[in-house]
Amino acid sequence: MKRLLILGAGTAGTMVANKLRPKLDESEWNITVVDQDETHYYQPGFLFMPFGEYTRKDLEKPKQELIHDGIDVVMAEVDAVDATASTVTLANGDAITYDYLVIATGTSPRPAETPGLASDEWYKSVFDFYTIDGAEALAAKLADWEGGKLVVNIVEMPIKCPVAPMEFLFLAEAFFDEKGLGDKVELEYVTPLPAAFTKPIAAKHLGEMLEERHISVEPDFMLESVDTKARKLISYDEREVAYDLLVTIPVNMGADFVGRSGLGDELNHVPVDKHTFVSKDHANIFALGDAAALPTSKAGSVAHFSVDVFVENFMEYIEGRPMHEKYDGHANCFVEAGRGKGMLIDFNYDTEPLPGMYPVPVVGPFSLLKETRTNHFGKLMAKWMYWNLLLPGRPLPLRSEMSLAGKHVELLAETSEATADTDDFPIPQFTNTGGN
């Protein structure tokens, strides 16, 4: 009996298990999923919680109910992976051997990594919304907040869903305007990136959205510490940004066992081949979803497209054949704009977001880099698709590889010429939540 061991029952781990179970003969293959948390959250919904759109119960389901029959589920914390012995040790002392290992344990906010951030002001004047507890606490705060300066700060890249901080600001601007507090709230976006968005075509559209909503941007801000008593952010170059209410996106790191096992980079994300997800150090270990160190978004769409590629490749890999499918970094993200509208971006490793229509050229129905109500409804519809199609592993009529059909490719050529001699626009850390 061969053993496929999957660490993590989040988006990528659940999809892999559910997609591979009908493909692998049960008399020859055991599939085991290990996870320490019993509850699965629809993480893109965290963005809406602070504004009263969802409650905790709207976004959670038991993980074991989402995993198909014929798959063993072990609820336990992982202590370490011995890659040489192909063994995983659990925190309770149990050990599980494997023939193939998939690490899909995601990434999570670590406020304690930044001096001063995890202080007694946590969930008083300093909040996050990338966790269910943080989003819930922030909802209670905003419900009766009377105004002041609200700062949204990214500590360090990469993060899950890199457009979510901007989405939060767009929603906040609309939320306070509807409450009659528009003239009493100042909004500022503080980012370590050289601009709010690092790819020129998308940057123009998103930059205009920020300007229209009177949201100021403080770029190149490398956060050194937070003085929660004085309520200010302090950068390594000694700049300061004051706030009355801070919404922070802390350092995101992979699971601790990844670091203990010597499998990760400095942020505990697993270095892998960006096309096949095979570990760069171990031929029988793969990493998927937010757990993988990839030069694209940490987003739900990345998990979806990459898992589709992985499943086909894995079936070839275990037979000793070359893996023919190559993941191209394809990701797409709905960008909530507030007031019932949204934007959509679609990109990959080599191609930045472009205007056009998606997924069908000319027809759409979704418009790229344009605020529409259809895009907003697409964002809301994604929740139903997530629970009922993506996690169960059902096929979707969406190509894993990015297509240029329906996009304004001439803009890409113009931008490439304009920036050919500069390094101002590196591969974006669009990184999503898991994504939004």
Image (spheres, grey):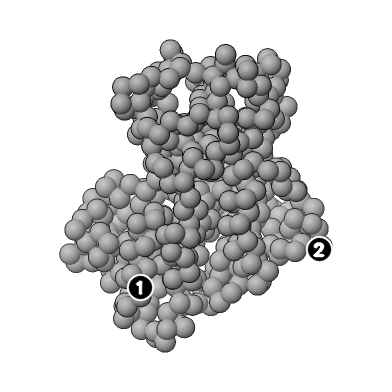
Q: Is residue 73 left or right of residue 330?
A: left
The answer to whether residue 168 is seen in the rendering is: yes
Residue that mark 1 sits on? 142
Give the quadrant of the N terminus: top right
The answer to whether residue 248 is seen in the rendering is: no
Vertical order, 157 against 379 (above or below): above
Identify the residue at image location x=66%, y=37%: 308
Identify the residue at image location x=36%, y=84%: 184
**CB under 8 Å between callouts 2 and 1?**
no
Observer-nearest of 383 and 329: 383
Task: Describe the element under mark 2 as helix, strand or loop.
Answer: loop
Q: Which percent across, then down, holds residue 148?
A: 31, 78
Q: Amino acid at mark 1?
A: Leu
Vertical order, 245 against 248 (above or below): below
Q: Of the numbered discs in the image, which one, if any, rests on residue 363?
A: 2
Vertical order, 379 against 257 (above or below): below
